[in-house]
Image (tube, grey):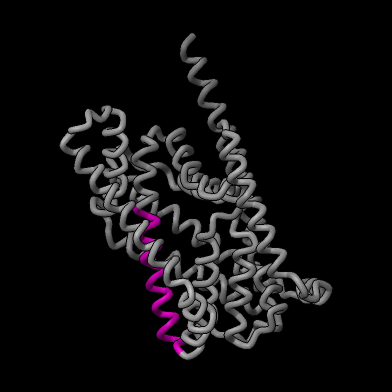
Amino acid sequence: MRISLTTFIRYLVFLIIGVLLLYLAFKGQDLNKMLSDLKRADFVWVFLSIISSLLAHIMRAYRWNLMIGSLGHGTPSMLNTFHAVIMGYLANLAFPRMGELARCSVINKSDKIPVIKLLGTVIAERMVDLLMLGIVFAMGIVLEFKLLSGFLYKHVLIKLSGRIGDITLLIFAFLLLITIIIFFLILMKKKKWGISNRILKFFSGMKTGILSVKNLDNKTAFVLSSVSIWLLYGLSSYLCFFALSATSSLGPGAALSTLVFGSLAMIAPVQGGIGAFHWMVSEGLTIYGIPKSDGLSYALLAHTTQTLIVLIIGSLSLILFLKQSTGKKQNEQTGKY
């Protein structure tokens, strides 16, 4: 895969932003104390947290498999889908948002399913995850209303109130973009612009993938797997609390808030949420009286362990995938003679 100079520069800028956020998050903190806290961490709880995250990845692969199966091109093996999902996470560590395309390419190579339709399923999946994040956020507000409402008022509403003009401009730009897209789709449907069959085929494939949720054979399994993914994410955050003495007294409500702040940070277009995750999670934990340095220790422990797991398992999956692809090519060449 060739990367243009513009794309390379963009990813480099994202990386610099992530490193800058990391620097700002840790600036002025007692790093020696943080390292000492991490050395004394109870890694049994870290291990349990990792297991919970791995189960979430497996459930994500299972849910995606359900969606792919509804496309009418057959259903990949769970192993292939898991490899694709974890390699997608691996790709995101280097190139933000490249993971979605990477995992679709893996399934395309292994099971010959059109990439465009697979991308449509990923878009649908992201819509469902956004809905789940909204539900988790609403639950957090209800369960931790006093704490979170004060934090949001202080850190969000007051700051945004002074930038009403900017917000109005962004809303206008967003509505304009939506209008242009709708107008374009109407023209495309009527074929008044003589749009090429390739473009029509592209949007048709996307539409099929996005509507894969509607055509699911087992909608109950899809809903349960979606809920399970977020429950396991929350459990992972909660279990990691017990690894450090400073956060061991925090309850499920704090884990819910941490999940929301961490998820919002991972949306940021920086490699693996670096910097953004540490800053947002540590800030969020201050709501519960956790000092910034202790919050950063927790964020560093949680983020580092999860990143290492993706690096290790993602690399193993990549090696197995490349080995499998090489074997298929050799068999195809042998069959020609």
Nearer to the camera, 140 or 26: 26
Residue 80 is covered by the magenta coloring = no
| Vertical position of residue 111 compared to residue 157: above or below | above
Residue at figure coordinates x 44%, y 88% from the top left: 145
Relative horizontal placement of residue 282, taking residue 42 as reference (left or right): left
Predominant SS of the magenta segment: helix
Tell me how many marks there are.
0
Which quadrant does the N terminus fall into?
top right
Magenta stretch, residue numbers = 124-145
Residue 141 is covered by the magenta coloring = yes
Residue 101 appears in the picture as rendered = yes
State the image quarter where residue 193 is shown. Answer: top left
Image coordinates for residue 174, horizontal then vertical, percent: 36, 57
State the image quarter where residue 283 is shown. Answer: bottom right
Residue at figure coordinates x 36%, y 63% from the top left: 171
Residue at figure coordinates x 48%, y 43% from the top left: 103
Q: Residue furthest bottom?
A: 146
Image coordinates for residue 311, horizontal then vertical, percent: 64, 51
| Vertical position of residue 150 compared to residue 37: above or below | below
Residue 225 appears in the picture as rendered = no
Q: Which residue lies furthest to the front in this view?
A: 165
Nearer to the camera, 73 or 11: 11
Image coordinates for residue 113, horizontal then vertical, percent: 37, 35
Nearer to the camera, 30 or 14: 14
Nearer to the camera, 129 or 26: 26
Image coordinates for residue 172, horizontal then vertical, percent: 34, 60
Residue at figure coordinates x 32%, y 60% from the top left: 221
Q: Residue furthest right?
A: 32
